[in-house]
Image (spheres, rainbow, N blue to C red):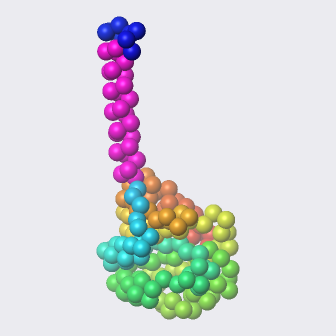
Amino acid sequence: FQFLSSQEMQSLKVKMDLDLQFLDSHLLRSSMIFNTVNKKEIIKEVKVNISLAKKEILATMLLEEEINNPLPKSYFNLLRNKVDEGVILKRLGFGKKEEYNKIRNKTLIDKKNYIFRFTTGGQDYQRLIIIDRKKIFFGRDGVFFKSKYQPLIKVFLKYFLDRFKKGKI
């Protein structure tokens, strides 16, 4: 840098400061979009947030995974309680009709505010649960995330609603 004049040095310093400010603000914004959730804590954290639901819970699942490695009974009891309180619960399973029937017969929630559908289009499956359209938990390749970032929730909401609308009962 000794070959630069003091004016050039000052100009370079200002540019570097601006680049660092941009980088800092970008990193700050991106870290606010979503956070990771420890795999050992995901069910506990989702259950806490389900218990806070007031209006609606939207969830997807791989039907085969749900049959082979079901979530704990306490999770389904909590969902049942929320439905009894009037919360709308919409679940969308990805898989075969036989798998859907097996889970549907096991769940035993018989309320108008509970809708469970399935789709055979599993190639674009995304694991997620959206609570009151204010918070989302989602997973990819064994890594779990959570977010309150509305633009991100809107993208996942559109994904869910598009597939749910086409889902079968």
Residue 76, can we see it?
no
Bounds of the magenta span? 9-33
The front one of 2 and 23 is 2
Q: Position of residue 11 (x, y in %)?
A: 34, 15
Tell me what residue is drawn at x 45 percent, y 86 percent: 72
Residue 131 at x, y percent in the picture: 39, 69
- Majority secondary structure of magenta residues: helix
- Please tell me in which quadrant of the rendered image residue 93 appears: bottom right
Q: Position of residue 89 (x, y in %)?
A: 45, 78
Which image quadrant: the C terminus? bottom right
In the rendered image of this protein, does residue 132 appear above or below residue 69? above
**Residue under the point 53% across and 67% down:** 142
Residue lying at 36% horizontally and 51% vertically, measured from the top left? 32
Question: Does the magenta portion include 15?
Answer: yes
In which quadrant will I find the N terminus?
top left
As drawn, 43 above or below 104 = above
- Horizontal side of 125 relative to 152 (left or right) equals right
Foreground: 109 or 3?
3
Specify the farthest residue to the front: 2
